[in-house]
Amino acid sequence: MAFVTLRVLHGADRGKVFEHLSTPVTVGREEGNTIQLNDERISRYHLKFQEDDDKVILTDLESTNGTKVNGEDIQVRIVRYGDMISLGRSLLLFGSRSEIDRRIAEVAGRHASINEEHARQISERIDRIARSSDVVADASGVRSPLLPAEPPPLPDRLGPAQAAQLAEVVDYIQSVLRTASEGVIARPGAEKVELDFADWQTVLDLQSRLAEMLRAIGNPTE
């Protein structure tokens, strides 16, 4: 069974810590939630943490004002220790101090560029965010210092059909970006490149389609 620890960094409940809660965990304004927050911009039942395949999954429960993880709107997302979760006017830090320190060590172990000093600085940056969050103008844009520099890993244990479907989606994205980038004009000595307006519209259309895909993944019954 997975357990969830959340620290409220910003909002009316700032300073509260909810430790070692067994999943599933719901967060919202209503008394029936595992965690009830005093924030009028939070929905009655706003989001849920649950365990699946040894991972903690965060799902937005079709809330009115949405949920962000590390500044990005989400419908469903794997959350990792050190992630910053924004809902309403509140900002939550996922994970206990020991869990976040363990993740910092794991990230440092995978990247030769992150030495002991760099790992200490990451830890200090998280602490600074926690201490200064009462003066954050827009908590929804706060991002975790532990954001990965590389793409997330591909899902494992896929069946042949699921693997083929995922490959089709990735190939479609690659094809659109490749076609758009072929029209880029790079002038010698210039710091910027030029992109034809039609190609730029193609990129914007791709962004819109990806947003629709994410919504469909988060709400498969729609």
Image (spheres, grey):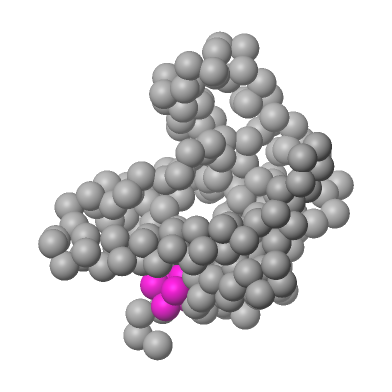
Taking 123 as reference, is 26 above or below it?
Answer: below
Q: Quadrant of the C terminus?
A: bottom left
Q: Residue at x 42, y 45 (%)?
A: 152
> Residue lying furthest left in this view?
160
Residue 147: image quadrant is: top right
Position of residue 204 relative to residue 156, above or below, is: below
Seen at 35% across and 85% down, the residue is: 221
Q: Which residues are magenta?
A: 213-218
Residue 48 position in % (x across, y down): 45, 65
Height in image: 65 above or below 92?
below
Give the overall secondary structure of the magenta segment. Answer: helix
What is the residue that sits farthest to the top in this orientation? 116
Q: Answer above or below: position of 164 versus 142.
A: below
In the shown orientation, is residue 134 left or right of residue 55?
right
Q: Nearer the viewer, residue 68 or 10?
A: 68
Q: Is residue 57 left or right of residue 164?
A: right
| Residue 96 location (% of width, % of height) | 51, 36
For residue 23: magenta?
no
Asked whether residue 171 appears in the rendered view, the answer is yes
Q: Position of residue 193 (x, y in %)?
A: 74, 51
Residue at x-position 63% and y-position 69%: 199
**Residue 75 seen in render:** no
Query: Nearest the camera: 160 or 76?
Result: 160
Judge by depth and name the residue closer to the eye, 212 or 52. 212
Q: Residue furthest front?
A: 188
Tell me the residue at 62%/12% (across/down): 117
